[in-house]
Image (tube, rainbow, N blue to C red):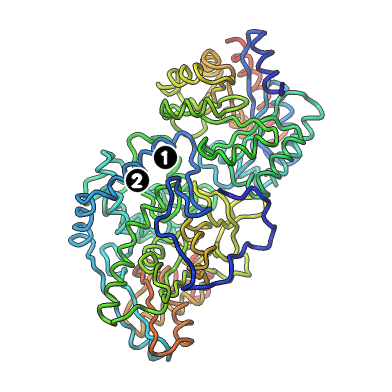
Amino acid sequence: MGRLETAFAALKAAGRKAYIGYAMAGFPERGLDLDFARAVLAESDVLELGVPFSDPIADGPVLQRCAERALAAGGGLDRAMELAAALRKESDKPLVLMSYLNPLLAGGLDTFAHRARVTGVDAVVVPDLPPEEDGLLAALRRAGLDVALLAAPTSTPERLDRIARAASGFVYVVSVAGVTGEREGFDGRLEATVRRLRARARVPLAIGFGVSGPEAARRAAGLADGVVVASTVLKAALGESDPARAVAAARERCALLAAAVRGA
Amino acid sequence: MPKTRPTSKRVPARGPARRPGRVRVRLDLPDARGRFGAYGGCFAPETLMPAVGALAEAYLKARKDRAFQGALARELGSFAGRPTPISFCANLTRECGGARIFLKREDLLHTGAHKINNALGQALLAMRMGKRRIIAETGAGQHGVAVATACAHFGLDAVVYMGEEDVRRQALNVQRMRWLGAQVVPVGSGTRTLKDAINEAIRDWISRPDDTFYLLGSATGFHPYPLMVRDFQAVIGREARAQFRRSEGRLPDAVVACVNGGSNAIGMFHAFLDDPGVALIGVEAAGDGVDSPRTAATMALGRPGVFHGAYSYVLQDDAGQVLGTHSISAGLDYPGVGPEHSYLRDLGRVEYVSATDAEAVEAFGRLCRREGILPALESSHALAHALRLAPRLKPSQAVLVCLSGRGDKDMASVDAFRAGKGGADGAA
């Protein structure tokens, strides 16, 4: 069993939901990004490690600003791999790499996949890689990586079935029709989306995008097996001008959200 | 399929040796997955995939529907001003002392550029799909003006995203869009130019996929946009080929168009792809030069990658981050290119060259003074290459240039460049 499967199975046995935290390579600055990732990982069951990209079309203003800052600080795929290697030495929690497709293609997708696996990355989430691209999905899986596909409130029933069949690791269920960032509430179609996936997917479901605070996290945890939270934590960090304070602020916010997820 | 093997670093990928006239081009592309050979495809976030799929389905139906094509032809004739003429440049031909130089006059269209061909086509499709909220991106502002115009004409709502940098350097077009009733939204993220305006338009569409139609202006992006935009612009080449043959009794020896995303070029080239005797040449913006960091020459310096939903040549660094660009022309500084161009480049059917800011400005001035035509800076890049090419050809030969737009919007940029203030960037 892989780390993701083991982690979700253990949580299920304990009757708990997974808190999936997020850190970005290069944010808030080089060097402190490892402290940031460590702090988030300490509060999380699974860590999503983000690769900043120049053109993040699925991201709202907070993650855009973080990516610009991270890139200016030398963040990118190489740095994400360095962070993954360092974290893997200290922890056996699952690491999920989140990246747009192009940085993964730049050095060759096979090369990336092999390198990620050897480094101790368990799964990838690629927002601009749809399930139709089976050749690319296969290249990632060949190296032993899980590919957590995204499902959206706008996905048709046929697409949800296809995503449920093709996903490995977990299905990343987008809670709103929109980009990443805090929202007032979830899309009205979310529950039906989760029900359909639940009936067909063999892997756990994690809800992400738009989870704005403890109340939303609790609701999401009530629907799925895990909750991914990024923007609201990074926003807390962006609000601090002192980078060391930023790490502390992120950890505080994570602790609050994780408690909500685990209490659900 | 994108290659999964590593590409060599730093050394830009090169297509095979040019063999114009001796290659077999498939005219039936893209395939059902939106591929032109290895290029193209549909790399969209899941939230958009259903909307993109519905768009492809609706377009493929409209494409075969006589009523739709008839309605578009009527709009192009009575509203946009088609057909546009071909003009012979007697003075420039004499000055160059070689091949005769002709212009396909898309600058004479309503709104002043070829962009209206596609804007009318997609706006008709939007209405057919029952969508009344239209969003668009714009760089130089020509596509934004075309969209605002089409929306005013058909009674649709228009929201146009435009990089802050472009809002500054293309102020005239911003005013035009606002007069036409469009909401212009300045985009302050990233490089604050076209690529970031596209990012923001895609984000808008992700947030409202059900009631919104994204009217993309270039032959780029997810399938079906490269196909749809090419089809709507192919009227340029179809007309030009027939007109030229009627007046000259033959086909031109070379057809030249500026390329960035590549909508006017693919529209101009498409009718000639199967004419082996016609050399097709796309001209990119070199900015300060292809060997300088201030350039936008994607074909010369880029490598294939996935950007804005399609696999195609992209100006990127070794880590796969998309690079900033420079061109005096706000309509030529996108760091990508349409997938069909990438296909034609690798095949060797189209040759891709570049022209610098200085060469474009010189061509701009020469066309103004010698022929009494004020060209857009984008089109001036194509013209600059034609002026290099014509002297090398025989007087019995002919070069046909797509004059994709008129240059009123560019006069401040040209004046600033001539005054030595560093071109468009200093035009504020």
Q: Residues within 10 Å of mark 1 (few under 14, many from 20)?
A: many
Q: Is residue B135 above or below residue B313?
A: above
**Mark 2 secondary-structure assignment:** strand
Name the quadrant containing residue A3.
top right
The residues tagged by marks 2 and 1 sit, at their Cα atoms, a distance apart of: 10 Å
Q: Residue at x 32, y 77 (%)?
A: B373
Residue A260, x across and y down, in percent: 59, 14
Q: Amino acid at mark 2?
A: Val
Residue at the spot 36% in from the left edge and 84% down from the top edge:
B369
Residue contact at pointers 2 and 1, CB within 8 angstroms:
yes
Residue A100 located left or right of residue B183: right
Kind of residue at badge 1:
Asp
Q: Position of residue A189 (x, y in %)?
A: 41, 22
* Residue B159 - label: 2
Q: Is residue A248 above or below residue B368?
A: above
Label 2: few (<14), some (14–19) or many (≥20) C-alpha neighbours in 10 Å: many
Left or right placement of residue A106 versus residue B157 in this view: right
Q: Is B316 positioned to the left or the right of B169 in the image?
A: right
Nearest the viewer among B38 and A228 is B38
Question: Which residue is depicted at the point 39% across and 53% down?
Answer: B227
Q: Nearer the viewer, residue A34 or A226?
A: A226
- In this view of the protein, can residue A92 be seen by the observer? yes
